[in-house]
Image (spheres, coloured by chain):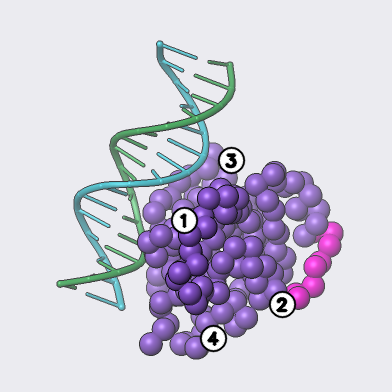
Chain colours: A purple, B green, C cyan
Amino acid sequence: MTDKNPKPPDSPDNEFTNQWPMDLSEYLKFDDDQWPEDDIETLVSGHVPNQDNQANEVGDFGGSGSGSHLEGSSSSRDVNSEREKKEARDRVAFKTKTEVEILDDGFKWRKYGKKMVKNSPNPRNYYRCSVEGCPVKKRVERDRDDPRYVITTYEGNHTHPVLARTQN
DNA sequence: CGTATTTGACCCGCGC
DNA sequence: GCGCGGGTCAAATACG
Protein backbone atom coordinates (compact mmCIF):
# COMPACT_ATOMS: atom_id res chain seq x y z
CA MET A 1 0.00 0.00 0.00
CA THR A 2 2.59 2.46 -0.94
CA ASP A 3 1.87 3.30 -4.48
CA LYS A 4 -1.59 1.89 -4.71
CA ASN A 5 -3.09 3.26 -7.85
CA PRO A 6 -3.65 6.62 -9.46
CA LYS A 7 -7.20 6.61 -8.38
CA PRO A 8 -8.99 9.95 -8.57
CA PRO A 9 -9.12 12.22 -5.51
CA ASP A 10 -12.50 12.56 -3.98
CA SER A 11 -15.05 12.71 -6.68
CA PRO A 12 -18.69 12.85 -5.64
CA ASP A 13 -19.35 10.57 -8.54
CA ASN A 14 -17.11 7.84 -7.32
CA GLU A 15 -18.64 5.40 -9.70
CA PHE A 16 -17.23 3.01 -12.18
CA THR A 17 -17.96 5.71 -14.68
CA ASN A 18 -14.90 7.48 -13.48
CA GLN A 19 -12.02 5.55 -14.90
CA TRP A 20 -10.22 2.52 -13.76
CA PRO A 21 -6.57 3.00 -12.84
CA MET A 22 -5.66 0.46 -15.41
CA ASP A 23 -5.69 -0.13 -19.09
CA LEU A 24 -8.80 -2.23 -18.91
CA SER A 25 -8.52 -3.81 -22.27
CA GLU A 26 -10.65 -6.83 -21.94
CA TYR A 27 -13.17 -7.94 -19.44
CA LEU A 28 -14.77 -11.31 -19.05
CA LYS A 29 -18.00 -12.09 -17.39
CA PHE A 30 -19.10 -15.59 -16.60
CA ASP A 31 -21.77 -17.19 -14.55
CA ASP A 32 -21.23 -19.91 -12.04
CA ASP A 33 -21.70 -22.30 -14.91
CA GLN A 34 -18.14 -22.76 -15.94
CA TRP A 35 -14.93 -21.13 -17.01
CA PRO A 36 -14.08 -21.47 -20.67
CA GLU A 37 -10.48 -20.57 -19.98
CA ASP A 38 -9.41 -21.60 -23.41
CA ASP A 39 -12.08 -19.43 -24.88
CA ILE A 40 -11.01 -16.57 -22.71
CA GLU A 41 -7.53 -16.47 -24.05
CA THR A 42 -8.77 -16.96 -27.54
CA LEU A 43 -11.27 -14.24 -27.05
CA VAL A 44 -8.93 -11.67 -25.58
CA SER A 45 -6.04 -12.70 -27.72
CA GLY A 46 -7.74 -12.92 -31.06
CA HIS A 47 -10.50 -10.47 -30.40
CA VAL A 48 -10.30 -6.98 -29.05
CA PRO A 49 -13.65 -5.99 -27.57
CA ASN A 50 -12.83 -2.29 -27.90
CA GLN A 51 -12.95 -0.20 -24.76
CA ASP A 52 -16.63 0.42 -24.53
CA ASN A 53 -17.83 1.99 -21.34
CA GLN A 54 -16.38 0.26 -18.39
CA ALA A 55 -19.31 1.67 -16.50
CA ASN A 56 -21.53 -0.23 -18.83
CA GLU A 57 -19.84 -3.46 -18.04
CA VAL A 58 -19.66 -2.88 -14.39
CA GLY A 59 -23.05 -1.29 -14.54
CA ASP A 60 -24.42 -4.63 -15.44
CA PHE A 61 -22.63 -5.98 -12.46
CA GLY A 62 -24.57 -3.74 -10.16
CA GLY A 63 -27.72 -4.11 -12.20
CA SER A 64 -27.60 -7.83 -11.63
CA GLY A 65 -28.63 -7.33 -8.06
CA SER A 66 -28.45 -4.07 -6.21
CA GLY A 67 -25.03 -2.61 -6.37
CA SER A 68 -25.20 1.14 -6.45
CA HIS A 69 -28.86 1.84 -6.16
CA LEU A 70 -30.26 1.88 -2.70
CA GLU A 71 -33.80 1.19 -1.67
CA GLY A 72 -35.35 4.46 -0.72
CA SER A 73 -38.04 2.78 1.30
CA SER A 74 -37.18 0.42 4.09
CA SER A 75 -40.71 -0.85 4.54
CA SER A 76 -40.65 -2.92 1.38
CA ARG A 77 -38.00 -5.36 2.45
CA ASP A 78 -40.06 -8.34 3.49
CA VAL A 79 -39.15 -10.29 0.41
CA ASN A 80 -35.95 -12.26 0.66
CA SER A 81 -36.77 -15.88 0.16
CA GLU A 82 -36.22 -16.81 -3.45
CA ARG A 83 -34.42 -13.60 -4.10
CA GLU A 84 -31.63 -14.47 -1.73
CA LYS A 85 -31.40 -17.95 -3.06
CA LYS A 86 -31.35 -16.75 -6.61
CA GLU A 87 -28.92 -13.89 -6.21
CA ALA A 88 -26.71 -15.83 -3.92
CA ARG A 89 -24.98 -17.05 -7.06
CA ASP A 90 -23.18 -14.22 -8.74
CA ARG A 91 -19.79 -15.11 -9.95
CA VAL A 92 -18.25 -12.65 -12.30
CA ALA A 93 -14.74 -12.96 -13.57
CA PHE A 94 -12.87 -10.02 -14.99
CA LYS A 95 -9.64 -10.38 -16.81
CA THR A 96 -7.98 -7.03 -16.68
CA LYS A 97 -4.70 -5.82 -18.07
CA THR A 98 -3.10 -3.97 -15.22
CA GLU A 99 0.02 -3.95 -13.15
CA VAL A 100 -1.72 -3.34 -9.86
CA GLU A 101 -4.02 -5.86 -8.35
CA ILE A 102 -5.49 -3.35 -5.96
CA LEU A 103 -7.95 -2.05 -8.50
CA ASP A 104 -10.38 0.29 -6.86
CA ASP A 105 -13.79 -0.46 -8.27
CA GLY A 106 -15.54 1.92 -5.93
CA PHE A 107 -15.72 -0.37 -2.95
CA LYS A 108 -13.48 -0.90 -0.02
CA TRP A 109 -11.94 -4.34 0.18
CA ARG A 110 -10.23 -5.94 3.08
CA LYS A 111 -7.73 -8.62 2.27
CA TYR A 112 -8.50 -11.67 4.33
CA GLY A 113 -6.13 -14.20 2.91
CA LYS A 114 -3.32 -14.97 0.57
CA LYS A 115 -2.66 -18.37 -0.94
CA MET A 116 -0.10 -19.69 -3.36
CA VAL A 117 -1.42 -21.69 -6.26
CA LYS A 118 0.71 -24.58 -7.35
CA ASN A 119 0.11 -24.01 -10.99
CA SER A 120 1.29 -20.45 -10.72
CA PRO A 121 4.27 -18.81 -9.09
CA ASN A 122 1.88 -16.03 -8.24
CA PRO A 123 -0.10 -15.90 -5.03
CA ARG A 124 -3.85 -15.65 -4.94
CA ASN A 125 -5.32 -12.82 -2.93
CA TYR A 126 -8.68 -13.00 -1.26
CA TYR A 127 -10.57 -9.80 -0.62
CA ARG A 128 -13.87 -9.17 1.08
CA CYS A 129 -16.07 -6.11 1.28
CA SER A 130 -15.25 -4.08 4.37
CA VAL A 131 -18.92 -3.41 4.86
CA GLU A 132 -20.58 -5.91 7.10
CA GLY A 133 -23.63 -7.44 5.57
CA CYS A 134 -21.95 -7.49 2.21
CA PRO A 135 -21.62 -11.08 1.06
CA VAL A 136 -19.40 -9.82 -1.69
CA LYS A 137 -16.05 -11.46 -2.07
CA LYS A 138 -13.30 -10.71 -4.52
CA ARG A 139 -10.59 -13.04 -5.64
CA VAL A 140 -7.59 -11.58 -7.38
CA GLU A 141 -5.08 -13.72 -9.13
CA ARG A 142 -2.34 -12.88 -11.59
CA ASP A 143 -2.38 -14.57 -14.91
CA ARG A 144 0.11 -17.37 -15.18
CA ASP A 145 0.88 -16.78 -18.83
CA ASP A 146 0.62 -13.02 -18.70
CA PRO A 147 1.78 -11.57 -15.40
CA ARG A 148 0.60 -8.22 -16.67
CA TYR A 149 -2.93 -9.57 -16.58
CA VAL A 150 -4.95 -10.16 -13.47
CA ILE A 151 -8.04 -12.26 -13.07
CA THR A 152 -10.47 -10.61 -10.73
CA THR A 153 -13.38 -12.75 -9.69
CA TYR A 154 -16.29 -11.11 -7.94
CA GLU A 155 -18.76 -13.14 -5.94
CA GLY A 156 -22.06 -11.83 -4.67
CA ASN A 157 -23.70 -8.43 -4.86
CA HIS A 158 -23.17 -5.39 -2.72
CA THR A 159 -26.02 -4.63 -0.41
CA HIS A 160 -24.84 -1.27 0.80
CA PRO A 161 -25.14 2.21 -0.77
CA VAL A 162 -21.89 2.23 -2.63
CA LEU A 163 -18.90 3.26 -0.67
CA ALA A 164 -18.28 5.23 2.44
CA ARG A 165 -14.72 6.02 1.64
CA THR A 166 -14.38 9.22 -0.30
CA GLN A 167 -17.69 10.27 1.05
CA ASN A 168 -17.77 13.46 3.12
C1' DC B 1 -6.19 5.02 18.44
C1' DG B 2 -8.34 2.82 14.73
C1' DT B 3 -8.29 0.47 10.76
C1' DA B 4 -6.21 -2.21 7.33
C1' DT B 5 -2.92 -5.40 6.36
C1' DT B 6 0.03 -9.55 7.09
C1' DT B 7 1.11 -14.46 7.89
C1' DG B 8 0.02 -18.87 9.81
C1' DA B 9 -2.94 -22.29 11.18
C1' DC B 10 -7.23 -24.49 10.86
C1' DC B 11 -11.16 -26.36 8.53
C1' DC B 12 -13.84 -28.45 4.84
C1' DG B 13 -14.60 -31.12 0.75
C1' DC B 14 -13.22 -34.33 -2.40
C1' DG B 15 -10.21 -37.88 -4.38
C1' DC B 16 -8.06 -42.10 -4.22
C1' DG C 1 -9.52 -43.66 6.01
C1' DC C 2 -6.10 -40.56 4.81
C1' DG C 3 -4.13 -37.00 1.92
C1' DC C 4 -4.24 -32.91 -0.72
C1' DG C 5 -6.14 -28.51 -2.19
C1' DG C 6 -8.45 -24.72 -1.43
C1' DG C 7 -10.60 -21.44 1.42
C1' DT C 8 -11.42 -18.91 5.68
C1' DC C 9 -10.59 -17.04 10.14
C1' DA C 10 -7.76 -15.21 13.69
C1' DA C 11 -4.06 -12.73 15.98
C1' DA C 12 -0.34 -9.65 15.39
C1' DT C 13 1.58 -5.83 13.23
C1' DA C 14 2.02 -1.56 10.58
C1' DC C 15 0.50 2.50 9.14
C1' DG C 16 -2.67 6.61 8.74
Where is mark 3, residue-wise?
A119
Q: Where residue A47 sits: x, y (%)?
A: 84, 62
Where is mark 4, residue-wise?
A13
Q: Where residue A95 sits: x, y (%)?
A: 66, 60
Q: Please, which chain is the residue tagged with disc 2 on? A: A
Q: Give me the C-alpha separation between circle 3 and circle 2.
A: 33 Å
- At 48% from the left edge and 64% from the top edge, which residue is drawn? A77
Q: Please, which chain is the residue tagged with disc 3 on? A: A
Q: Give me the C-alpha separation between circle 4 and circle 3.
A: 40 Å
Q: Residues within 10 Å of mark 3 (few under 14, many from 20)?
A: few
Q: Are marks 1 and 3 on the same chain?
A: yes
Q: Are marks 4 and 3 on the same chain?
A: yes
Q: Residues within 10 Å of mark 2 (few under 14, many from 20)?
A: few
Where is mark 1, residue-wise?
A135
- At 79% from the left edge and 49% from the top edge, which residue is drawn? A39
Q: Please, which chain is the residue tagged with disc 4 on? A: A
Residue A82 can be seen in this image: yes
Where is mark 2, residue-wise?
A53
Q: Earlier in the sequence, mark 1 or mark 3?
A: 3
Q: Give me the C-alpha separation between circle 2 and circle 1.
A: 26 Å
Secondary element type, mark 1: loop
Q: Is residue A133 within the magenta segment?
A: no
Q: Give me the C-alpha separation between circle 4 and circle 1.
A: 24 Å
